Amino acid sequence: MPGIRRTTSWWNSPQGVVGLFPAWYAPPQPDWPQGVELTDFPLWDESEVTSLSPELEDFLDAGDPPIAFTPGSAMQHGTAFFRESAAACQQLGRRGILLTRFRDQVPGDLPSGVRHFDYAPFSLLLPRAAALVHHGGIGTMSQALAAGIPQLIMPMAHDQPDNADRVRRLGCGDWIKPRSYRGPAVAARLQRLLDSPQVGAACEQVAARLAKRDGLQRAAVELERLGSRL
């Protein structure tokens, strides 16, 4: 079988399309391809093969739940994001975790209580965090929804603006433009999210919807059903 050169030619396959998100998150629309089947968020994050590092465990145990920040695992130009994120933590007087495998992006003079870590499975980290600030990728976003914590999104491309808008409409967070991502503005938005009983309640409600879901299993079943028709 020849290799796939352009995945875009498969997106609207007449044989079937599987959406890895629930209908309450993105209800089907009249202009969607025929035969779209929605499952749920996969919520896979390497937690079955990777645990929290001892250093991260110690940091989490040493104080109040921190705010976690990530511009996405593939982002190689996150220097400004991490600089302003650290400044926001300092202004708030909150602990922070900066997540990236590209260590050269992290400021060398981090404030007290702000630490850098290469990676952490979100399903293990986020339930112990106060909030998540991120780029709006659907995998990261759905993990924050499952953890029941507020999220502030700085969308840049692809599906990120749409995810940011949906999180805001769910009442589980807010978004900020990349050009506005500055320490004081980030701190102000995070403070509003963390202080809001309405946001906290909305996060709990959405987390309850995801508590007993198995998106990977449902997707596998749907793929087997589609395969049996070929």
Image: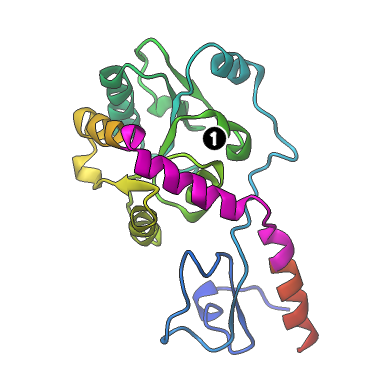
x and y, in percent, of residue 78 in the image:
36, 36
Q: For residue 196: magenta?
A: yes
Compared to residue 43, the image places residue 221 above or below, namely below
Image quarter of the N terminus? bottom right
Residue closer to the observer: 230 or 2? 230
Q: Is 116 rendered above or below residue 181?
A: above
> Viewed as shown, does residue 208 lie left or right of 51?
left
**Nearer to us in this view, 124 or 120:** 124
Q: Give the residues in magenta.
A: 193-218
The residue tagged 1 is 126
User: What kind of element bears circle 1?
Assistant: helix
Assess whether residue 38 is covered by the magenta stretch: no
Q: Quadrant of residue 15?
A: bottom right
Foreground of the two, 24 or 92: 24
In this figure, which colouring scheme has been used for the structure? rainbow
- Residue 132 coordinates in the image, percent (x, y): 43, 37
